[in-house]
Image (tube, rainbow, N blue to C red):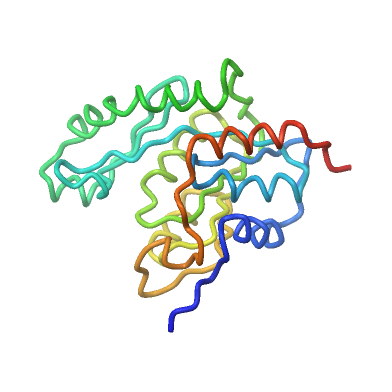
Amino acid sequence: MFSARFKNRADAGKQLSQALPAIDRQSTLVAALPRGGVPVAAQICRARGLPLELIMVRKIGAPGQRELAVGAVVDSGRADVLVNADVAAAFSLTQEDVEKLGRNELPELARRRKAYMGDREPSMIKDKTIIVVDDGVATGASLRAALLSLRRRQAERIVVAVPIAPPQTAELLEQEADMLVCLARPQPFHSVGTHYADFRQVDDDEVIETLRELSAEPSVD
């Protein structure tokens, strides 16, 4: 019988916080991909005394197959688009085609930013170490788009922290980040959710409540 690697996202976050190297708190922040990455990242923030930022990123679904990513788009003051070249080619989509599809996702990204962050301006990224967190990756399109955006915003160092990823995606992330902390790289890889005992969907209310709790908690000395 298959045994789940993580009890839930909080458990995964606690394990990741223990696996991360020593961190300079003054120059580091945690950046989560909503929604699933938020409860994972919250545990790292609590354990390491770090602030939490959100990276608003949306998968760009293939025509007729929304769950298959032809790319991803990040709302960071500009629409940064990463194309999943192999998948796009399979659907005969050009870079322009994928960018056009990506623009359709911008209203939802704007809605989420308003709902989660209100009128708060995004944290300064320039010259900082950014720990990018999600609850796991499959193709990695969304996470890689986030890395592209952070590079353009002049992050000094990017550490990707994820509980689980297939080996081929982990290799890509190792090339594009300065460091990858990944707790499990199963082969064969079926899905992120199969490695959690509890992988219920994270909704907007949970994200908002987590951000509220973190803002109210005293910082770690």
Q: For this rendering, which residue is in front, 178 or 48?
A: 48
Q: Is residue 201 above or below residue 20?
A: above
Residue drawn at 59 percent across, 34 percent down: 155
Of the 4 image quadrants, the one containing the C terminus is: top right
Q: Is residue 183 above or below residue 110?
A: below
Residue 205 location (% of width, % of height): 53, 35
Q: Is residue 110 above or below residue 196?
A: above
Give the residue at the far right of this rendering. 221
Residue drawn at 64 percent across, 41 percent down: 30
Residue 23 location (% of width, % of height): 75, 48
Residue 108 location (% of width, % of height): 37, 27
Q: Is residue 13 left or right of residue 4?
A: right
Give the residue at the far top of this rendering. 119
Q: For this rendering, which residue is in front, 21 or 111?
A: 111
- The answer to which image quadrant residue 10 occupies is bottom right
Q: Is residue 157 above or below residue 75?
A: below
Of the 4 image quadrants, the one containing the N terminus is: bottom left
Number of numbered tags placed on the structure image: 0
Residue drawn at 62 percent across, 47 percent down: 41
Give the residue at the far bottom of this rendering. 1
Q: Is residue 85 left or right of residue 53?
A: left
- The answer to which image quadrant residue 192 occupies is bottom left
Residue 215 location (% of width, % of height): 72, 31
Residue drawn at 63 percent across, 26 percent down: 123
